[in-house]
Amino acid sequence: MLSPSDRESSSSSSRSPSVLKLGASSREDPEPEGEEKICAVCSDRATGYHFHVLTCEGCKGFFRRSISKGVRFTCPFTRNCAITKAKRRQCQACRLQKCLAMGMRKDMIMSEEALQMRRDLRKQKKQVRELAGEPAELTEEQEQLISILIEAHKKHFDSGFSQFVHCRVSPPSGPLGPLESLPADVLPDVFSMLPHFADLSTILIQQVIKFAKEIPAFRSLPIDDQISLLKGATLEICQIQFNTVFNEETNAWECGQHRYTIQDGALAGFQQIYLEPLLKFHISLRKLRLHEAEYVLLEAIVLFSPDHPGITQRDTIDRLQEKVALTLKSYIDQRHPLPEGR
């Protein structure tokens, strides 16, 4: 399911030191939107503005540690080393110099005393909320995770299915019976639905793969585990994504200019015994009135399932799934209290 270039990229990511991070840690400034985010220091994937410069997590942490500890580095070469994702650890002196040259500010690094005061203040606020019976706020890590998932979702899932502008067929109207009982002039429409649904499934699967690869924790896993997770979760994630365009009043999936019903599935040859439970699932899930954050967290929970065959890092994946599940619970408690019927 992953191309050779994807394997190389994922294998490289699996050697990252932050293998258990679901997302990047806190940011000082908002991320830019609608553009590729590249670290100004090493050209790795950036996670946001840190100390006044758009950087990756690695360079952010390196800069903070270097300045906080007051370390003096010496370049063993010509003091003009190229700082790239692959070579950034070879010369700390040139890396720090480039951080400063790009505009990273020493004065934005909080002292240990200031950090401790902030932690103490947060602890006090949490205790006050607990005494008042209020739900706990989302942590910075949880907020970051939700942000990464939503961004990946918006980037790779096309709810309008614009690729299918010229592919949508018009199935015959009226009640449907078994395929054998359909009139001869209807059969061409029946068979024209088959490649259409095959193409639709292919597009959705490709979107799921791209979505998963945007999650740092997924990229950090061994390539074989990535493949096993995708094999086991892709179809379920497709259904969760498809639910975002389901209209419970018409029992139809409204994808931009396109509209699909259970009858379309029957025309494509799917048996009613499978279609009816599928429709009930979408009706029930849609009634929950999920927020976008809840949808993407559900998709991540399904993705990080340690029970799929072929998994080698079961404990790691189990912990990842637990973190996502706890984030979903915290989000529901804080942002989406259960209304009647939810």
Image (cartoon, rainbow, N blue to C red):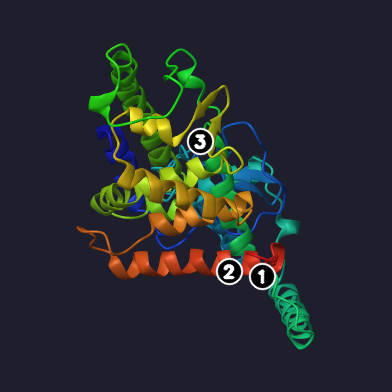
Q: Position of residue 19 (x, y in %)?
A: 39, 60
* Left or right: 3, with 100 as reference point: left
- Regarding mark 2 in the picture, which secondary structure is present there? helix
Residue 212 visible in the shown view: no
Find residue 333 and name its label.
1
- Give the distance between the C-alpha atoms of the residues marked 3 and 2, in whole angstroms: 24 Å
State which quarter of the image contains the C terminus.
bottom right
| Amino acid type of the residue tagged 1 in the rendering | Asp
- Give the distance between the C-alpha atoms of the residues marked 3 and 1, in whole angstroms: 27 Å
Disc 2 + disc 1, Cβ < 8 Å: yes
Q: How many marks?
A: 3
Q: Position of residue 7 (x, y in %)?
A: 28, 40
Find residue 149 and name its label.
none
Reading the chain from its start, which is encountered first: label 3 or label 2? 3
Disc 3 + disc 1, Cβ < 8 Å: no
- Give the distance between the C-alpha atoms of the residues marked 2 and 1, in whole angstroms: 6 Å
Q: Residue at x 73, y 81 (%)?
A: 120
In this view of the protein, which residue sits in the foreground, 157 or 63? 157
Reading the chain from its start, which is encountered first: label 3 or label 1? 3
Q: Quadrant of residue 287?
A: bottom right
- Regarding mark 1 in the picture, which secondary structure is present there? helix
Find residue 329 and name its label.
2
In this view of the protein, which residue sits in the foreground, 211 or 193? 193
Mark 1 is surrounded, within 10 Å at the Cα level, by few (under 14), some (14 to 19) or many (20 or more) other residues, namely some
Q: Position of residue 79 (x, y in %)?
A: 50, 42
In this view of the protein, which residue sits in the foreground, 89 or 336? 336
| Amino acid type of the residue tagged 3 in the rendering | Phe
Mark 2 is surrounded, within 10 Å at the Cα level, by few (under 14), some (14 to 19) or many (20 or more) other residues, namely some
In this view of the protein, which residue sits in the foreground, 69 or 229? 229
| Amino acid type of the residue tagged 2 in the rendering | Lys
Residue wearing tag 3:
157
